[in-house]
Amino acid sequence: MRAWWLVLLASGVAFAAQVEVPVAGHTVAVLVEQPPGPGPHPLVVDLHGSGWHIENNRSNVLEWTRYGYIGMDVEYTQDVDSLSVEEVNAAIDWCKQHHAVSAVAIHGFSLGARVAWQTAITRPDLAGVSGMAGRVRLWDGRQPALDLVSHITCPVLIQQGQADQVVPAADAEAFAGALLGSGKPFECYLYASLGHRLDRIPWTRPRAAQFLERCFRPRTK
């Protein structure tokens, strides 16, 4: 693991680092922002959308520290779904080893939401998973978020614009139906007049933050 940069601040964010984490014969860049204090702190993995990189998502990662959470994003491989999940899992495991983490949740937008759904299938230690405008269908046509929904063990938040021209609202509806059929706790918000860029709507991220706070609450008392 090679640290790219490390910043220690006297006030505000106490720790900020971009590091390379080994996974599957290569390394993946991980951005970590930690709030002041020794912790333990909940960890929120904030996964960016297609075409973005961790640098584009820095302000969103930093935002989680204002809630007292560790914020993290992963420079996951954007065109290989299985590798994306493997990289995110490796980054979470790294963070748990190197930081005082009390609980873990994932929030994602667009492609990041799709990766979040898939990662939730593989991690029984998640406190919650939140996604905005995320597909359930993979590049190869499989739909593990639907087919393996019984493997999800945490509450799920779905936010989707019904006027989305990139990700069909039918994906969110199908995912919600699968969660309902499996008896999983979830919240689903369909916004009739909104399109794909839910990340630009001022109240969608606060809604995700409120959801994750409820998910963390029983584990951080």
Image (cartoon, rainbow, N blue to C red):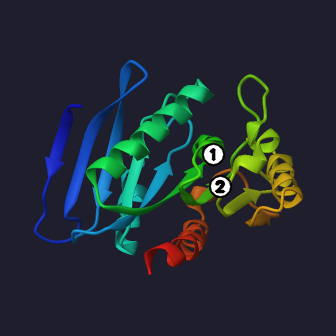
Q: Where residue 132 is drawn, which disc sits there?
A: 2
Quadrant in the picture for residue 49: top right
Farthest left residue? 10
Q: Secondary structure at mark 2?
A: strand
Q: Residue 203 at x, y = what percent?
A: 59, 72
Specify few, some or many for label 2: CA neighbours under 10 Å numbering under 14, 14-19, or 20 or more.
many
Say which amino acid is labelled 1: Ser
Task: Name the residue located 79 percent from the left edge and 26 percent from the top edge.
Answer: 141
Against 101, residue 11 (above or below) is below
Quadrant location, the C terminus: bottom left
Quadrant in the picture for residue 182: bottom right
Say which amino acid is labelled 2: Met
Specify few, some or many for label 1: CA neighbours under 10 Å numbering under 14, 14-19, or 20 or more.
many
Q: Are marks 1 and 2 in contact (CB under 8 Å)?
A: yes
Q: Residue 175 at x, y = what percent?
A: 81, 51
Against 110, residue 195 (above or below) is below
Q: Is residue 53 visible?
A: no
Q: Which residue is mark 1?
A: 110
